[in-house]
Image (cartoon, rainbow, N blue to C red):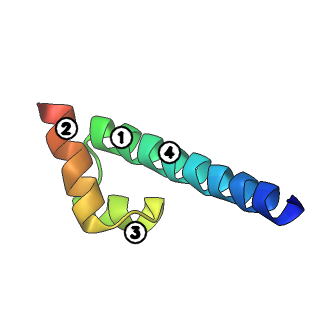
Amino acid sequence: MCRIMEDMRNESLKEGIKEGMKEAALRMLAAGKYALEEIANISGLSLEEVNQLKAERNA
């Protein structure tokens, strides 16, 4: 049972970190000072994910 709880906690932590990276990427997109490749490199997201965030932001 402890292992299941630990796995759930770890998964929640990973999701939280990913959300934080997305928020940082959105701020960089809003600033308009960074190339998409730079945003991907700095945020740790893939270029595809950055492009998707940009498309969602512009929709």
At x 54%, y 45%, the residue is 20
Q: For label 3, count other residues whose C-alpha is less than 10 Å away and answer few (under 14), some (14-19) or many (20+).
A: few
Q: Is residue 59 left or right of residue 14?
A: left
Amino acid under disc 2: Glu
Of residues 6 and 42, the one drawn nearer to the viewer in this rendering: 6
Amino acid under disc 4: Glu
Numbered label attached to residue 47: none
Which label's residue is closer to the chain start, 4 or 3?
Answer: 4
Of residues 21 and 12, the one drawn nearer to the viewer in this rendering: 12
Q: At numbered mark 4, what does the secondary structure look like: helix, strand or loop?
A: helix
Does residue 2 appear anywhere in the picture? yes
Foreground: disc 1 or disc 2: 2
At x 35%, y 40%, the residue is 26
- Tell me, yes or no, whether the two marked residues, 3 and 2, touch with CB atoms within 8 Å: no
Q: Quadrant of the N terminus?
A: bottom right
Q: Which residue is mark 2?
A: 56
Measure how far apart labels 4 and 3 are at the Cα level.
Answer: 16 Å
- Tell me, yes or no, whether the two marked residues, 1 and 2, touch with CB atoms within 8 Å: no
Which label's residue is closer to the chain start, 1 or 4?
Answer: 4
Residue 32 picture location, percent across and down? 25, 42
Residue 23 picture location, percent across and down? 45, 40
Which label's residue is closer to the chain start, 3 or 2?
Answer: 3
Q: Which residue is mark 4?
A: 19
Foreground: disc 1 or disc 4: 4
Q: Which residue is mark 3?
A: 41
Residue 52 picture location, percent across and down? 21, 51
Residue 25 picture location, percent across and down? 39, 48
Q: Which residue is mark 1?
A: 26
